[in-house]
Image (cartoon, rainbow, N blue to C red):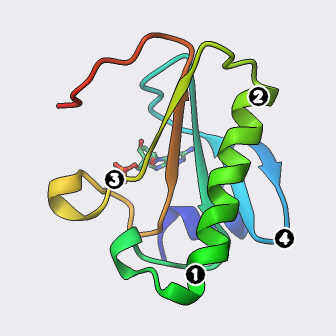
Amino acid sequence: MTVFKKIIDRQIPADIVFEDAECLAFRDIQPQAPTHLLVIPKREIRSLAESQPSDSALLGHLLRVAAELATRLGLDNGYRVVINTGADGGQSVDHLHLHLLGGRPLRWPPG
Ligand code: DGP
């Protein structure tokens, strides 16, 4: 079981900022920006690469939730949404998650 599943099941604590029937958003434990949230589906999908066409509506919902949270948290000057995928993508938790980063200028390209 991944650490994110444990957060969904309330087996370990997290600073949860949003929840609905399909997803959960909480603050990253190692923030890389003044605002750094993770938006995750409650259903266990290991990565974007392992998502299916039938997950399309859920994936769209996660993006919309990220956008709504960015507005709610006042990221009016912009923000970045990142999905690290697989080893080269730097994915460290095998439960699909969107990073929502903002509150400072973000450089490009990432490392
Ligand atoms: P990634 O490297 O893209 O797989 O991102 C995983 C992120 O998850 C990383 O930024 C740190 C965060 N993280 C790992 N364990 C925990 C945890 O127990 N609680 C919270 N809030 N975040 C975690």
Estimate the spatial distance between the alpha carbons at disc 2 and disc 4, rounded to whole Å.
21 Å
- Can residue 11 be seen from the camera position used here? no
Viewer-nearest of discs 4 and 1: 1
Q: Nearer the viewer, residue 100 or 95?
A: 100
Q: Position of residue 109 (x, y in %)?
A: 21, 28
Q: Amino acid at mark 2?
A: Thr
The answer to whether marks 3 and 1 mark residues whose Cβ atoms lie closer than 8 Å is: no
Residue 3 position within the rendered picture, expressed as x and y whole percent measured from the top left: 51, 63
Which residue bears the numbered disc 1?
A: 55
> Does label 1 point to a residue whose CB lies under 8 Å from ligand 1?
no
Query: Quarter of the image holding residue 60?
Result: bottom right
Q: Earlier in the sequence, mark 3 or mark 4?
A: 4
Circle 4 packing at 10 Å, graded few (<14), some (14-19), many (20+), is few
Report the residue marked by disc 3: 84
Q: Which residue is mark 2?
A: 71
Q: Residue at x 40, y 69 (%)?
A: 48
Q: CA distance from mark 3 to mark 1?
A: 17 Å
Q: CA distance from mark 3 to mark 2?
A: 23 Å
Nearest to N terminus: mark 3 or mark 2 = 2
Gap between marks 4 and 1 measured at Cα: 15 Å
Mark closest to the chain's N terminus, 4 or 1: 4
The disc label shown at residue 65, or none: none
